Image (cartoon, rainbow, N blue to C red):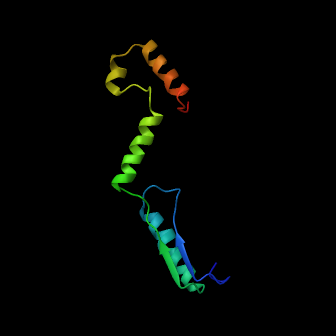
Amino acid sequence: MAQAGTQSVDVVCPGFTGDCLETLEEISMEGREAFLHAGGKTFNYIPCMNDEPMWIDALAAISEQHMQGWPTKLQAAQASAAVLANGRELAIALGAKQ
């Protein structure tokens, strides 16, 4: 992009929910170096959501939505096979993947 005349880029990695050493090294550091070396002027790496409270709340809500009908560990320990089968069917009907 820099060789084509782009002077500034903002980089976000929507496939990652949390930064890790590889993300930071390969994308933020190596990507920055390659872009600037090729003539770019400004490279902004936008960090992942990591442990931001709003993201954790959203992740919890998404998890709860997709786990509806699945028994908890205590329920599973106390439940019969029929109850577990019914819970599984309900979860699948609500959109859980098999």
**Residue 44 horizontal/vertical position (percent):** 48, 75
**x, y percentage for residue 91?**
49, 26
Q: Quadrant of the C terminus?
A: top right
Examine the rendered structure and indicate whether residue 48 appears above or below residue 66: below
- Residue name at image x 36 percent, y 27 percent: 72
Q: Is residue 50 left or right of residue 32?
A: left
* Residue 4 found in image quarter: bottom right
Vertical placement of residue 4 versus 70, above or below: below
Q: Residue at x 43, y 39 (%)?
A: 63
13 and 81: which one is in front?
A: 13
Q: Residue at the location (58% across, 83% down)?
A: 7
Is 53 on the left-hand or right-hand side of 92?
Answer: left
The mark total stands at 0
Say above or below: 21 vs 15. below
Q: Position of residue 88 (x, y in %)?
A: 49, 23
Q: Quadrant of residue 6?
A: bottom right
Up/down of 58 relative to 75, above or below = below
In the picture, the quarter occupied by the N terminus is: bottom right
